[in-house]
Image (tube, grey):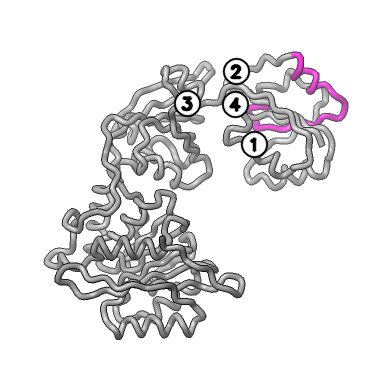
Amino acid sequence: MHLTIIGISDESTPIFSSEVKERLVGDGVRFAGGERHRELVEAQLPANASWTNITVPLAPFLQEMREYDGAWGVFASGDPLFFGIGNTLRREFPDATVEVFPTFNSLQLLAHKLLLPYGTASVVTLTGRPWQALDKALVDNQKLIAVLTDKVKTPSTIAQRMLTFGYANYTMYLGERLGGSEERVRELSLEEALTADFIHPNCLYLQQNVTRPIRQGIPDGEFQTLEGRPKMMTKMAVRLASLAAMDIRNRSVLWDVGACTGSISIEAKLMNPLLDVHAFEVREESAAIVAANARRFGAPLTYHGGDFGGADISAIPKPDAVFLGGYGGKMEQLLDRVNTVLADGGIIGFNAVSDTSLGQFAAWAASNGYQQQPSSTIKVDEHNAINVVVVSKKLNGSYTEVDGS
């Protein structure tokens, strides 16, 4: 199979080089691209050219390519290797010979319009992807962030997420239908972006106005706590020791069951910005408290209110790390439920405040085939000593050691 992957603008009829034109007239070449690509290039294709529209999901298109093991001319937007179809095709057809003829991608076009030094930007694609890459760029205090959008993660939903989690310290520069007659480039505050109208496709840059401190190891007194119960929160020394013991930097999805004020969830997100954090709490008043704390410290997370034992968890990404912060007298029932969704090789962290709760947790872990990792005991000021315990779930019939260093 020979693949010629050609990058073009989404908005203007391309002028092909002689080298590209040679690839377009070969016998038996089949062509593919988006519907808009076809409109732009159809007049330059051979008469009776065979064309396949590339749509999502890609499986039917990839199967058609497997069935025709010949020459393909594939049209893509901008640079096909810049978060584009070229990467997918190289992965799916590793034995194919590939030629790539790129043009400017949309973020380059926008940077040229704005005279931005885009080589210094942190590049994030939200096109069909989750939020974590943007979370990381924000938590890491990146001064210039380049963002590829889609029809779900639009400029307005991006602005809403940033404001929700305290990142009002950026200006948005938006480019729409770049390269064509409907091109529009605008500077917007995040508040303006919430209600602005947008033309698709678009992309944007976020430029930082004020640097906010990177927080890890947050003093307890800075958290908003439950009214009248300021001590009902995992203390900083215990938080940090627990998350280190859980090897949280190498985890993907954390469920914080019994999140209370959200201190574990927030500290975990700041330690590992790519972590997908889900905080569960039954107390109704905790929703506002967790939201306020997450905004104050810039920790994007997902909050789930209500009783974890009866919640619908089918649509929530499955965890490879769970912290059991509270259990309301139902430890075994909650752990049983966690066990049904926890990934093989996943871990559960627990802070035991008494020998009874420690024994109960250890007994459940042993009876369910979990292996206890090295534990520690911490005493903070006048508070009771806390046992920091982590257990790991079997991975393919064996155990994984947790590197808590």
- The residue singled out by tag 1 in the image is 85
1 or 4: tag closer to the N-terminus: 4
Residue 273: x, y in percent?
Answer: 40, 49
Is disc 3 placed on a helix, strand or loop? helix
Residue range in magenta is 18-39
Residue 315: x, y in percent?
Answer: 48, 61
Name which residue type carries label 2: Ser
Crowd rating for badge 4 (residues with CA inside 10 Å; few <14, some 14–19, many 20+) = many
- Residue 78's mark? 4
Q: Could you tell me how far apart the alpha carbons at marks 4 and 2 are, in whole angstroms?
A: 12 Å
Q: Seen in the image, is 229 located left or right of residue 173? A: left
3 or 4: tag closer to the N-terminus: 4
Name which residue type carries label 4: Gly
Instruction: Tell which residue pokes out farthest to the right in this image.
Output: 27
Is disc 2 placed on a helix, strand or loop? loop
Is disc 4 placed on a helix, strand or loop? loop
Instruction: Tell which residue pokes out farthest to the left in this image.
Output: 228
Q: Is residue 221 visible?
A: yes
- The residue singled out by tag 3 in the image is 119
